[in-house]
């Protein structure tokens, strides 16, 4: 390291870096770049040539060019841009009559913030997310500050995500009826606070149920089995029950059939044989009647079982407006469907069959094992006997051989 530091090349680089840093600083000092000046768009914007009184005449430049938008220069050297629009933005610099830079400033034009349009989502009892959109286009970078509280409680921060223009509150005081959210937007031209009041239990709206699955039941041309999961954002807990609504219709029909299943899975008994069906599900907090239904889950398309369901008739395919992308609808891929149990309307039939099959295979396994065991034991016994015979024969021979001595 010391060798490296003392090498001429390295020293030169360090010297150059420090030189450029120093001259950069010096330049900033002489330039007096006070940073950015913000101006109201479509108004007269005044740019002063530094703080001190300036000798006239001064010359103004925009982006190092002497071409300026509509303007006038006041007796004290300030530049007034008349009815400035976006094209007037840029780096302004003023110079004395010898061309020496006196002052420079970057001008940005826009508007002060206006009120925000705020909406809050409450996907469960422990989470509030509020998002906003600006009602006024400011053209300027903005800062936000958001706080949240239940009536009579302390303000607490609503945690900001500026990229997505929303903020989150975890574990809001759900027992409080009214909550207030305050969002302050500020930019170079001012600030504005938007206040919204709302009732969490009215905003409570679960996400749609997930993993909706609709299957045809082999042997039943009017039945569909519907299964689903709780939305991932809803706690699966007895304290937070959900109620569900399923709706379904033959594709092309204007009327939905609606059912309120207790739990997953649910069997539809009155599907229209031979028709592709649309099926959807949504959820609602079971306890709180003032809360909202979730959105409907995405549509599923399923055809009930058909006698000739393995081969689709071509005319049917041309009728369809949606691709039949659910293999469940046509392929009887479930081996348990080949059962004599299919008389049972209940889904438990399948479970029973599986248990039966398992028991049956266990019995067979045990039988085979015991057979093998019995055969093995007998074989062993026979071996033993022959061995004994052999040894006695050997003994006998021995006797015979030894005997005469
Ligand atoms: C801007 O300046 C022009 C010329 O000085 C003047 O006529 C006009 O009224 C000013 N506009 C505003 C909004 O002050
Ligand atoms: C204006 O100035 C800023 C810094 O003050 C600089 O980054 C930018 O490149 C300048 N723009 C022009 C067009 O000179
Ligand atoms: C001056 O430079 C800025 C970028 O710093 C640019 O946005 C602006 O359009 C330029 N203005 C003119 C008049 O060229
Ligand atoms: C945000 O607002 C609260 C109250 O309105 C205030 O106490 C806090 O200082 C503000 N924070 C920032 C970063 O502006
Ligand atoms: C509530 O919803 C939020 C946002 O989807 C999620 O992050 C959180 O885990 C959920 N809470 C529970 C208890 O599921």
Image (cartoon, rainbow, N blue to C red):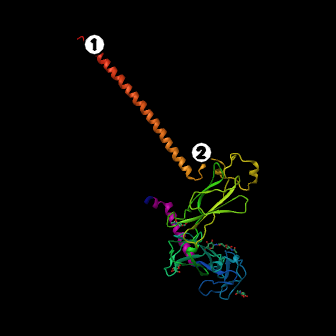
- Whether residue 11 appears in magenta in the rendering, the answer is yes
What is the chief secondary structure element of the magenta stretch?
Answer: helix
User: In this view, which residue lies farthest toward the front?
Assistant: 343
Viewer-closest of 361 and 142: 361
Q: Disc 2 vs disc 1: Cβ atoms closer than 8 Å?
A: no
From the image, tell me which residue sits under label 1: 401
Q: Earlier in the sequence, mark 2 or mark 1?
A: 2
Name the spot of residue 46 as percent of width and height, x first: 66, 84
From the image, tell me which residue sits under label 2: 340
Location of residue 163 with respect to 343 vertically, above or below: below
Where disc 2 sits, the SS reads: helix
Q: Where, quadrant-wise, is the C terminus in this rendering?
A: top left
* Picture residue at 71% right of the left edge, 58% below the top: 251
Viewer-closest of 202 and 53: 202
- Whether residue 322 appears in magenta in the rendering, the answer is no
Instruction: Please provide the residue range marked out in magenta.
Output: 4-29
Where disc 1 sits, the SS reads: helix
Name the spot of residue 15 as percent of width and height, x first: 51, 66
């Amino acid at each position: 390291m010391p060798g490296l530091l003392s090498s001429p090349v390295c020293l030169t680089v360090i010297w150059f870096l420090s030189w450029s840093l120093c001259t950069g600083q010096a330049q900033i000092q002489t330039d007096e770049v006070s940073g950015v000046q913000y101006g109201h768009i479509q108004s007269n914007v005044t740019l002063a040539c530094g703080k001190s009184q300036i000798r006239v005449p001064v010359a103004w430049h925009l982006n190092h060019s002497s071409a300026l938008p509509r303007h006038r220069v006041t007796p004290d050297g300030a530049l007034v841009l008349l009815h400035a629009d976006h094209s007037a933005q840029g780096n302004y610099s003023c110079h004395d009559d010898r061309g020496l830079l006196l002052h420079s400033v970057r001008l940005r034009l826009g508007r002060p913030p206006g009120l925000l349009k705020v909406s809050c989502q409450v996907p469960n009892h422990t989470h509030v997310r509020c998002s906003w959109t600006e009602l006024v286009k400011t053209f300027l970078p903005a800062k936000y500050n958001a706080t949240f509280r239940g009536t009579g409680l302390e303000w607490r921060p609503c945690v900001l995500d500026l990229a997505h223009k929303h903020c989150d509150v975890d574990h809001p005081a759900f027992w409080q009826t009214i909550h207030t959210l305050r969002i302050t937007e500020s930019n170079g031209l001012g600030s504005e606070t938007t206040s919204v009041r709302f009732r969490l239990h009215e905003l409570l709206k679960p996400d749609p149920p997930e993993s909706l699955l609709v299957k045809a039941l082999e042997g039943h041309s009017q039945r569909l089995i519907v299964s689903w999961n709780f939305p991932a954002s809803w706690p699966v807990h007895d304290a937070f029950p959900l109620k569900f609504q399923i709706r379904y219709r033959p594709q092309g029909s204007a009327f939905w059939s609606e059912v309120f299943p207790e739990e997953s899975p649910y069997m539809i008994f009155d599907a229209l044989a031979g028709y592709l069906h649309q099926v959807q599900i949504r959820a609602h907090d079971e306890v709180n009647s003032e809360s909202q239904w979730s959105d409907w889950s995405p549509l599923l398309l399923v055809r009930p079982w058909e006698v000739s369901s393995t081969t689709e008739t071509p005319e049917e395919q041309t009728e369809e407006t949606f691709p039949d992308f659910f293999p469940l609808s046509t392929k009887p891929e479930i081996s348990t469907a080949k059962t004599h149990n299919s008389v049972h309307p209940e889904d438990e039939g399948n479970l029973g069959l599986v248990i039966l099959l398992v028991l049956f295979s266990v019995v067979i396994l045990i039988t085979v094992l015991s057979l093998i065991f019995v055969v093995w034991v007998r074989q062993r016994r026979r071996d033993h006997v022959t061995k004994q015979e052999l040894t006695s024969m050997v003994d006998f021979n021995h006797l015979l051989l030894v005997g005469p001595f």
